[in-house]
Amino acid sequence: MTAAATRTVARISGLGKQFGDRIVLDGVELDIHHGEIVALVGRSGSGKSTLLRVLAGLSDEHCGTVEVDDRFALAFQESRLVPWLSVVRNVALGLPDPRQRRHGAHRARAVLDEVGLGRCADVWPLTLSGGEAQRAALARALIAEPALLLLDEPFGALDALTRIAMQDLLLRLFDEHGFGGSSQMRV
C-alpha cells in the first residue's frame, strides 16, 4: 500500500449521540482511509444519516472524538439545488472559496460534462428530471475534489435503472479521479 492509500480521511472514536432518551449512536469506532469506499447499512432510523451529519459537522451535540479531513463534500438524498440559480451556478457553489464560485463556471461546466449534464448547464434546476438533479448535486460535491465524499442515500429516490446508472457513474468517477490530495484533519 502507498502512503496515500493508508492516509486516514476520517477517524471516529467512541462516538455517541442521542435524541432525548433515544440512543442513536453508541460507542461507534471507525477509520476511513484514502481510496476506501465505505457503505453504512442499516434499518431506517438506525443512525446512518446521523453519523454522516456528525462527520460533516452538521451535528455537534455528541460525545466521543470525530476527526475529518478538512476537504470533504456531502450530497443528500434530495438534490437541494438552489432554484433561482442555473445548474452551472449550483455546481460552482461546491467550490470552497467564494472568489472561486464567482469565476468557477468553466470548471463547473467541465464537471457537468463528466456527469453527462453538459447540455443542462444553463437551465433552471426545476426543469431537470430526478436523475439529472442528482447528477447535478453529485457534480456540486465533486467540483472541489474532496478527500472524503459523504453520500446520504443520494440515489434512494431514483427509479431502479437510474439508480444503477448513477452508481456506475460514481464508481467510474472514483476510478478515474479517486478522491483526495494533501489536506488537513479537523476535529
Image (cartoon, helix red, strand yellow):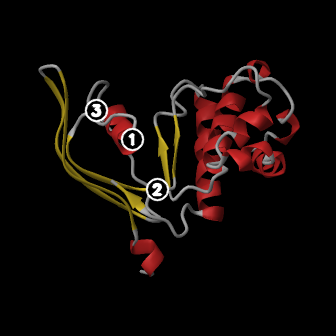
Measured along the vertical axis of the image, is residue 144 above or below residue 57? below
Q: Position of residue 53 (x, y in %)?
A: 38, 36
Q: Position of residue 49 (x, y in %)?
A: 37, 33
Q: Amino acid at mark 1?
A: Gly
Nearest to N terminus: mark 1 or mark 2 = 1
Occupied quadrant, residue 42: top left
Q: Nearer the viewer, residue 93 or 143?
A: 93
Q: Residue at x 73, y 44 (%)?
A: 101
Q: Residues within 10 Å of mark 2 (few under 14, many from 20)?
A: some
Mark 1 and mark 3 in contact? Answer it, CB < 8 Å: no
Q: Amino acid at mark 3?
A: Gly
Q: CA distance from mark 1 to mark 3?
A: 15 Å
Q: CA distance from mark 3 to mark 2?
A: 23 Å
Mark drawn on residue 47: 3
Q: Nearer the viewer, residue 46 or 172?
A: 46
Q: Residue at x 52, y 70 (%)?
A: 182
Q: Amino acid at mark 2?
A: Asp
Measured along the vertical axis of the image, is residue 126 above or below residue 164? above
Measured along the vertical axis of the image, is residue 134 above or below residue 181? above
Q: Residue at x 64, y 36 (%)?
A: 137
Occupied quadrant, residue 124: top right
Viewer-nearest of discs 3 and 2: 2
Q: Is residue 44 left or right of residue 135?
A: left
Nearest to N terminus: mark 3 or mark 2 = 3
User: What residue does disc 1 label?
Assistant: 57
Q: Residues within 10 Å of mark 3 (few under 14, many from 20)?
A: some
User: What residue does disc 2 label?
Assistant: 70
Q: Position of residue 68 (x, y in %)?
A: 38, 54
Measured along the vertical axis of the image, is residue 42 above or below residue 5? above
